[in-house]
Structure formats: structure tokens, C-alpha cells
């Protein structure tokens, strides 16, 4: 069975919903597809308060922002299909979906891929034991499913994901025995790290995990100090009594659908690895396919929402729903907010990396 849509958005997270809202506000007909039973993506796992500008919800908890965004989408007539797996993209803008164990195809004038990212693994002796999991998986279990997967935790990685999830583990009643960071300095924002250290959580910089031990599940973990060459220093091993090891060692854009659609990819290490080549309108090398959010490079939820808005305005313009003059004015406002979000040392690196992606897109177009 084939269904026709004006715009198909894959992914009901912050980027996908933000794009859907912009398109719908300008009269577009939008269908959003997501494999989960709840929309909102990362926002509904974020129980902490956002900080930054008031426009980006400073002082508001992430899931509240998700609820507001979802409500606005429904008010503007956005169709949201949950428990729907998108299994492929095919010629002539056909999207393969499975709903209630029945396969369908949907055709769309324009497609937005906003499927986010997947967690990077880390291999070490014992990494296949029950109790070793991604930090995002633990966050989902705690904040969405209300299940505490363990009692005593070791967190690998001191980026914002590792720090935020560690604090949420404490809030849920778990104990964070330690956080391990291979670099000599904490990788995430100090505001998150300080909250943990005030709670007595020890952060082991210049350390890595050596092994996890246990018979049927994790029973303890061994960490070890590493030198400037990142090689373990013999005799510095510490054995920790833990039953859960969470991995927060980075994210990588989810590219499966983009590979199927033959979109050109480019490798940018500062943004998480391979990602779709795209221009500043979030348009890929397939002119009918746009991208937004972590699938375009790993950043924060606020940036994902802005990229979603940018993609939404670009799609609405391409469909003739909004004129170029008005669209450019809105895009200028969005881009200024993105510049503000990417200010500071970490943000400047992402900004330069994104500008390099745009430059390489223009080079590809000119070939």
C-alpha cells in the first residue's frame, strides 16, 4: 500500500519536531515517523534544567520543552506516527515503513532525516558482561522506563553525557563509585562536574578501564592510570566494587538511511565521524533530502532544534510555502542563534567544522 505525503520526517526528536512545526506553521502537510512509542527523542530523557538563553529554555527541564514542542506540533496539524520503523529509502522518494507488522511505502515531495546518533562502544576484557551498557541506555531505563539498571556504577567518560547521566543516577537512588576520563582534564562543562564532586563522586582523570570482572554479570571493575602516550602505567590499578559500567565515550551519527539514499558522506572527527555532506540550508547532495540534528554532527539539543527550524524553513521555501525574502529573514535569525550556541572554545571548534562541511558541499556541487 502506498501513501503520499508532502513532507516526510524521519525521527520525532528535537530536530524533527522543530522542523515539522516550522513547515506546518507555513501551511505544509507533514508526517513524522518514529520507531519509539513516545515522541520527543532526547528531550524526554533530559530531566535537568537547560541553561543558556531564555529562547532556548534556560531554567526549564528538557522534558517540559519536549512537551511544549509536541503540543505545538499537534495544534498545527502535524501527523505523528509512533511505533513505526523506517526500514529504507528508495528511488522516487519512497520511504519504506512498518506499522503493526505491516509494510507500507510512503512517497514524499521532500524528506527530512533527523534520526540522531548511536552510542560508540568501547572494548575491554569483560565488556560483554551483563551490566556493561551505554550511558544513554541507562538514561533511557531510568528516566523513561523508571528502571534502575544497577546499584553501583562506574561511568567511563567525563563529557556532558557522562556527567549528566551520572547525576541522574544519583537522583534515582544509585551510587556512582567513580567517573573515568582518559584525558588529563574533565571533558564536559564544569557546572555538571562540580555538582557531582559536591556529592562526593570521584573523577579519575588520566585513567581508563582495564577490565570488568564477574561470573554472570559485572561484579567489579579495574581501572588504571595512563601516561601521556595513553598506555597503562603498571602498578596503578584500582579495583572498584561496581555492578554496572556505563560507557559515555562518544556518539556517532546514524547513517544507515543516508547510505541507502546515496547521499555523499564526509568524515569530520570533531563532529563524531562520518556525516552527510550538506549545505547551510541543511540540504544533502540529494536535493530532496534534508538533515538536521545529531545525524549532521554531534552537538546539544538546543542546536538540534535550531537546525530543525533551519531545515523546516528551507523545505517550506523549496515547496513554495514561503517566499525567499521572508525565508532569508527567518534564516538569519536562526543562524544568529546557532552562532550564539556555538560560542566558546568547544562551540567554536564545531562552528569551524560545520563551515568546513558547507565549503566541501560547495566544492562537490561545482564538480
Image (cartoon, rainbow, N blue to C red):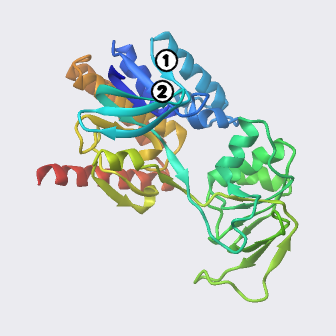
Residue at x 39%, y 34% (from the top left corner): 96
Q: Secondary structure at mark 2?
A: helix
Check the picture and name the quadrant holding the C terminus. bottom left
Question: Residue 17: which numbered mark, if any?
Answer: 2
Mark 1 surroundings: few (<14), some (14-19) or many (≥20) residues within 10 A: many
Q: Find residue 95 and report its image quarter.
A: top left
Q: Position of residue 153 (x, y in %)?
A: 80, 57
Question: Residue 194: which numbered mark, if any?
Answer: none
Check the picture and name the quadrant holding the N terminus. top left
Residue at x 78%, y 52% (from the top left corner): 196
Question: Residue 73: which numbered mark, if any?
Answer: 1
Q: Secondary structure at mark 1?
A: helix
Q: Are marks 2 and 1 in contact (CB under 8 Å)?
A: yes
Q: Earlier in the sequence, mark 2 or mark 1?
A: 2
Above or below, 24 relative to 85: above
Camera-side residue of 191 and 144: 144
Which residue appears farthest toward the bottom when viewing the image? 234
Mark 2 surroundings: few (<14), some (14-19) or many (≥20) residues within 10 A: many
Which residue appears farthest toward the left when viewing the image? 367
Residue at x 64%, y 51% (from the top left corner): 161
Res. 189 visible in picture = no
Res. 297 visible in picture = yes
Amino acid at each position: 500500500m502506498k501513501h503520499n505525503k508532502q513532507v516526510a520526517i524521519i525521527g520525532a526528536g528535537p530536530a524533527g519536531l522543530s522542523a515539522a512545526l516550522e513547515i506546518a506553521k507555513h501551511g505544509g502537510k507533514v508526517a513524522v515517523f518514529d520507531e519509539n512509542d513516545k515522541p520527543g527523542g532526547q528531550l524526554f530523557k533530559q530531566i535537568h534544567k537547560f541553561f543558556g538563553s531564555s529562547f532556548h529554555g534556560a531554567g526549564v527541564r528538557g522534558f517540559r520543552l519536549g512537551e511544549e514542542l509536541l503540543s505545538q506540533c499537534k495544534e498545527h496539524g502535524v501527523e505523528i506516527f509512533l511505533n513505526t520503523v523506517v526500514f529504507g529509502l528508495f528511488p522516487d522518494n519512497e520511504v519504506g515503513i512498518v506499522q503493526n507488522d505491516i509494510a507500507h511505502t510512503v512517497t514524499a515531495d521532500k524528506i527530512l532525516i533527523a534520526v540522531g546518533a548511536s552510542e560508540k562502544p568501547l572494548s575491554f576484557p569483560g565488556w560483554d558482561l551483563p551490566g556493561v551498557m551505554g550511558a544513554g541506555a541507562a538514561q533511557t531505563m531510568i528516566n523513561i522506563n523508571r528502571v534502575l539498571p544497577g546499584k553501583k556504577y562506574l561511568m567511563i567518560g567525563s563529557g556532558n553525557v557522562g556527567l549528566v547521566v551520572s547525576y541522574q543516577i544519583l537522583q534515582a537512588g544509585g551510587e556512582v563509585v567513580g567517573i573515568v576520563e582518559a584525558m588529563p582534564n574533565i571533558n564536559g562543562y564544569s557546572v555538571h562536574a562540580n555538582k557531582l564532586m559536591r556529592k562526593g563522586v570521584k573523577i579519575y582523570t588520566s585513567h581508563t578501564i582495564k577490565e570488568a570482572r564477574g561470573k554472570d554479570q559485572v561484579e567489579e571493575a579495574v581501572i588504571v592510570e595512563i601516561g601521556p602516550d595513553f598506555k597503562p602505567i603498571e602498578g596503578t590499578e584500582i579495583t572498584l566494587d561496581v555492578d554496572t559500567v556505563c560507557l559515555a565515550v562518544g556518539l556517532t551519527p546514524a547513517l544507515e538511511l543516508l547510505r541507502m539514499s546515496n547521499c555523499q558522506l564526509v568524515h569530520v572527527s570533531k563532529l563524531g565521524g562520518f556525516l552527510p555532506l550538506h549545505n547551510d540550508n541543511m540540504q544533502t547532495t540529494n536535493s530532496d533530502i534534508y538533515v538536521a540534528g545529531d545525524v549532521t554532527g554531534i552537538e546539544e539539543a538546543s542546536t538540534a532544534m535550531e537546525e530543525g527550524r533551519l531545515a523546516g524553513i528551507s523545505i517550506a521555501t523549496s515547496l513554495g510555502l514561503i517566499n525567499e525574502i521572508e525565508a532569508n529573514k527567518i534564516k538569519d535569525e536562526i543562524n544568529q542563534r546557532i552562532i550564539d550556541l556555538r560560542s566558546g572554545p568547544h562551540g567554536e571548534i564545531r562552528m569551524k567544522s560545520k563551515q568546513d562541511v558547507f565549503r566541501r558541499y560547495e566544492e562537490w556541487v561545482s564538480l
